[in-house]
Image (tube, rainbow, N blue to C red):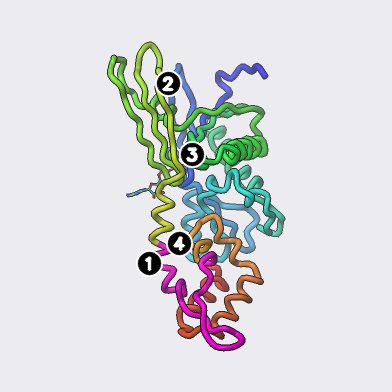
Amino acid sequence: MAHDWAGKTLGIDFGTSNSAAGVAVAGKPYLIPIEQGAPTLPTSVFFGVGASQMSMGSAANRALIAGEEGRYMRALKSVLGTSLMGEMRMFLGEKMNFYDIIGAFLSQVKSRAEAQCHQIFDYVLSGRPVRFHSADEDRNARAEADLVECYMRAGFKDLRFLVEPEAAALASGVPRGPGLSLIVDIGGGTSDFCVFRMADGIEVLANSGIRMGGTNFDKRLSLDHVMPLLGKGALIRNEMGKGAMATPNSLFQKLATWEQIPFLYAGDVKRDVAKMVRLAVEPKPMERLFEVLDMEL
Ligand SMILES: Nc1ncnc2c1ncn2[C@@H]1O[C@H](COP(=O)(O)OP(=O)(O)OP(=O)(O)O)[C@@H](O)[C@H]1O
Ligand SMILES: [Mg+2]
């Protein structure tokens, strides 16, 4: 479709950990203060029990830290291209999936930017990692299609993508010259790289990326230092006969993965864990795990 993109396009960096929005004025990019004067907002959402609206960004983080009752989610971008996208769950008394949640987040970014700029943005220029998923081309394509769908739900009429390290290269202010430059963008979910030269415009020589970032470090920390306190590696006596087996690893993998945590609050998971509490050789860690799930901590 041919559009007049100029003046109606909002630039969005939908990041795994933080998001930002900007506009081009006379060809130069400007960040829009979309969060109480700040140019970035945490990519997180909170569905408070009894609340009528989802809160997002710093407000969602404050709700989590204050211990408000509800469901907190982050690293939403990591779900793009996975089968979790379409899974329905109840939030605020409504059935929602990740298309709805990410769409609602992006819709808020759109309306906050519109309020700041006193204009409507019909189109979006969105960043995307070079690779959402490291080696799997099918999944990369699905992730991109998922993100398109989320932007459509947010109310945009059309969009274009720019790979994130190239956007960083454009915004870097590197002066014209014969030398080569390298952008290294280590994010929450992916790390992206761009080799470029500034000639008359930007000349990109190579873009590359891997699915590895800050959330992988968070996960390792959680798995190695927190999950053992909640029963990772603990022994559960067999129900029939002698012997014992280690607790299932998949449970702790999920609990250490931001986007999977809300799926552990289901009744059947809690029943399984309650059974493990009864059969545990060492009940204390399993009791802690049950409490974490039961209280949605
Ligand atoms: N002081 C710090 N020391 C180490 N790591 C940090 C620090 N502050 C932030 N980080 C890491 O940086 C990550 C956030 O970076 P950034 O905001 O660039 O990611 P993003 O753009 O949201 O993610 P992506 O581009 O992968 O989608 C966090 O996940 C965190 O792990
Ligand atoms: Mg980023």
Question: What amino acid is labelled 3 in the image?
Answer: Ile
State whether residue 177 is above or below residue 43.
Answer: above
Q: Which of marks 2 and 1 is in front?
A: 1
The mark found on residue 225 in the picture is 1
Q: How many labels does the image show?
A: 4
Question: What amino acid is labelled 4 in the image?
Answer: Ile
Q: Which of marks 4 and 1 is in front?
A: 1
Label 4 secondary element = helix
Q: Which of marks 4 and 3 is nearer the N terminus?
A: 3
Q: Nearer the viewer, mark 1 or mark 3?
A: 1
Q: Is residue 40 visible?
A: no
Give the magenta-colored segment's residue range: 222-251
Q: Which of marks 2 and 3 is in front?
A: 2
The mark found on residue 28 in the picture is 2
Q: Residue at x 47, y 63 (%)?
A: 66
Residue 109 percent coordinates (x, y): 55, 39
Sort mark 3 into few (<14), some (14-19) or many (20+) by Cα contacts within 10 Å: many
Disc 4 marks which residue?
A: 65
Q: Which of marks 4 and 1 is nearer the N terminus?
A: 4
The answer to whether the residue labelled 1 contacts the one labelled 3, judged by CB atoms less than 8 Å apart, is no
Q: Which of 289 and 235 is in front in this view?
A: 235
Sort mark 4 into few (<14), some (14-19) or many (20+) by Cα contacts within 10 Å: few
Q: Can residue 247 be seen in this view?
A: yes
Question: Distance from label 4 to label 3 (Cα)?
Answer: 22 Å
Q: Does the residue labelled 4 lie within 8 Å of ligand 1?
A: no
The mark found on residue 34 in the picture is 3
Q: Which of marks 2 and 3 is nearer the N terminus?
A: 2
Q: Residue at x 51, y 67 (%)?
A: 249
